Image (tube, rainbow, N blue to C red):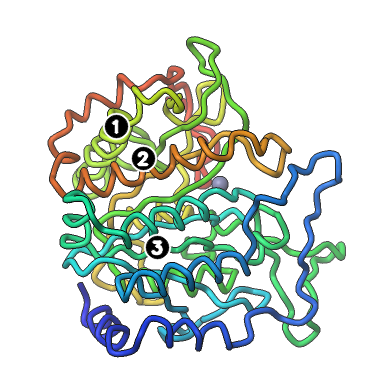
Amino acid sequence: MTELTRSASRSLTRRSALATLTAALAAPSLAPGAAATGSLPPENRTPTGAIRSYADMQRELERIARASGGAVRVTTLSEQGTAEQFSEQGRELYVATVGHGPEPVWIQGRVHGDEPYGLDACVTVLDRLAAGGSADVARVRDEFTVHVIPMYNPDGSEMNTRTTTLWDRAQDAPVRDAEGAPVTVDLNRDWRLDGFRARESRAWYEYWTRVRPSFVLDLHHQSVKQSAQTGEDISFSLGVSLAPGGPTLPEVRGGEYDVLTRQMIGHVWQSVRHRGHISADRYDVGDGQVIDIRGGVVSAMMLGLNWNGLNADGHANPAVFFETSGNTREGGLGQKARGKLLKQNVVATMALLTGWADSTVTEVDPAVWDEIPHAPVEAYVTDWGGVIPA
Ligand SMILES: [Zn+2]
């Protein structure tokens, strides 16, 4: 834990969680004129009634903080005093912390705004951790300080878009390119030395350099998917954004994360594989292609990216991601399945936390990675070298 994190924790415990939250809620959280409706044609829209909004997130965090008796602390990056503090459109960036352990952990949802259940999973996991009760949860709270970011990309979430839109604050309008189109940024490709185009990226990156997590989980949605082997519907894909055994990860920290990420995913898969409501496999993008993206948020964390001198000593951490099948972008996210799609994220997230806390994760045979259903890997889709044959 860094000095900055320690002092931030101290200042948070001095104030009541509710006072913190009330101050955050009272601050202006939305630029006037910020777009609030989706851009999908109506026929492609998933009914959005059950998809939580930014205001819903604020209400949920307030509820959890109040009910937790101080166990869950809610804050914003403007309170934390990062150089960038808001989204492009001026929304506050929220983080909830729970636990009092020495190891910081980072869980983020909705870096892609139209992938909604990362937020829901974060809320339910916070509820679980706040409630305490079981020995497993007590151990997590003793070992970790968990930083939960339910909505990394609030503007995209409100617009129901994958990306965020760069915003001209003087004009209170989107920044436009030479053709007059709004300039959008995929926040999960923006953590690179020539990136950090969006305020969200700069704000969350600085916060990451303060937190210095031990490990990270990133929650996404994918398209509707069938198993390459059996044709059955896949509800949940598990992945690493720098491919294990791929062109990048074996070279990072002497191969440490190449092993550790296989153990993390292997442990999660072993924890969910016999659950009837979850059909899990390894993530791919189709045609035997897997990703190896260096500008992804959690990839850059694994690479120990040092941007603007903020990570001069090269903190790095292993990271994995979960993909729930179906998204609002393609209209493939039915409301009927919401309960079980949410539950699989909660079960898997709790498995990762408890498994790390009791050292089960690091005892997993990394070869379990090979047992997880997957199509043969034929190529790596990269954001740095095109498509590279495996
Ligand atoms: Zn995504």
Instruction: Sort mark 2 into few (<14), some (14-19) or many (20+) by Cα contacts within 10 Å.
Output: many
Left or right of 288 on screen, residue 131 = left
- Vertical comparison of 202 with 151: above or below: below
- Per the image, label 2 sits on a secondary structure element best described as helix
First in sequence: mark 3 or mark 1?
3
Residue at coordinates 28% horizontally, 44% vertically from top-left? 352
- Per the image, label 1 sits on a secondary structure element best described as helix
Q: Amino acid at mark 3?
A: Val
Residue at coordinates 58% horizontally, 88% vertically from top-left? 26
Of residues 146 and 282, which is closer to you in this image? 146
Which residue position is annotated with label 1? 271
Q: Residue furthest top?
A: 230
- Residue 205 at x, y = what percent? 43, 69
Quadrant where the N terminus sits is bottom left
- Residue 268 at x, y = what percent? 31, 35
Q: Amino acid at mark 2?
A: Ala
Instruction: Sort mark 3 into few (<14), some (14-19) or many (20+) by Cα contacts within 10 Å.
Output: many
Which residue position is annotated with label 3? 148
Of residues 191 and 366, which is closer to you in this image? 366
Residue at coordinates 43% horizontally, 88% vertically from top-left? 19
Checking the image for residue 348, the label placed there is 2
Answer with the quarter of the image where residue 165 lies: bottom right
Mark 1 and mark 2 in contact? Answer it, CB < 8 Å.
yes
Left or right of 361 on screen, residue 46 = right
First in sequence: mark 2 or mark 3?
3
